[in-house]
Structure formats: structure tokens, C-alpha cells
Amino acid sequence: MFIGEAGTFEASGNEITMQALVAKNPAAMTKGATSVYTYQGNGETLMLTQVRTASGPRAAPATIKLVRVE
């Protein structure tokens, strides 16, 4: 799967709220279509878990693991 988005974010506590300005999926660019993730950093790794979308809370949240590569 490929997801491509660029936009803005706001971090508060351990949550990040993301709003896509440009996206592969046109639905992601509609007004009010935000995604909320909790995050946890550990050295070279960042874990993001999607907890809420514009549709409401996620019943089975997806987790994204990002690892720094040099």
C-alpha cells in the first residue's frame, strides 16, 4: 500500500493531529478530514498509532513504525 500526503500537523501532549493539504486520496483533503495519532519515540524509532479520523474513533487502530536510516 502507498499513502502520499503533505500538509500540516499540531502536536499536543502525546498526540499529533494531521491535516492533509495535498494527498493521493482526494477524501483526505476535504475540510475537517483530520487524523489523530498517539506517538512514542525511542532513540532511532518512532511509533505512531492512529486513534481517530474524521469518521470517529478507530475500533482497530493501525500502528506505523518509523526507523531512522543513515
Image: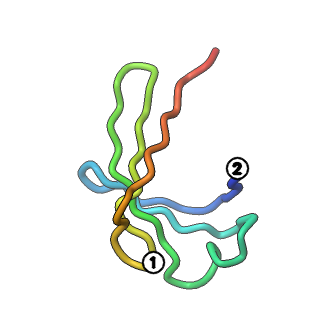
**Residue at label 2?**
1
State the residue at coordinates (49%, 62%): 18
**Residue at the (67%, 59%) spot, across then down:** 5
Horizontal and vertical percent position of residue 27: 65, 78
Q: Residue furthest bottom?
A: 31
User: Label 2 amino acid?
Assistant: Met
Q: x, y (%) of residue 26?
A: 72, 76
**Is label 2 in a helix, a strand or a loop?**
loop
In the rendered image of this protein, does residue 53 appear above or below residue 14? below
Left or right, 11 with respect to 20, comes to left
Left or right position of 31 against 49: right
> In the figure, residue 3 lies in which quadrant?
bottom right
The tag on residue 54 is 1
Asked which colour scheme the image uses, the reply is rainbow
| Residue 46 in which image quadrant | top left
Q: Position of residue 47 (x, y in %)?
A: 41, 37
Amino acid type, mark 1:
Ala
Instruction: Tell me which numbered mark, 2 or 1, is placed earlier along the sequence.
Output: 2
User: In the rendered picture of this protein, how many numbered marks are placed on residues?
Assistant: 2
Which residue is depicted at the point 52% across and 33% down?
Answer: 66
Q: What's the distance in space between the residues labelled 2 and 1, CA to CA?
A: 21 Å
Q: Nearer the viewer, residue 33 or 10?
A: 33
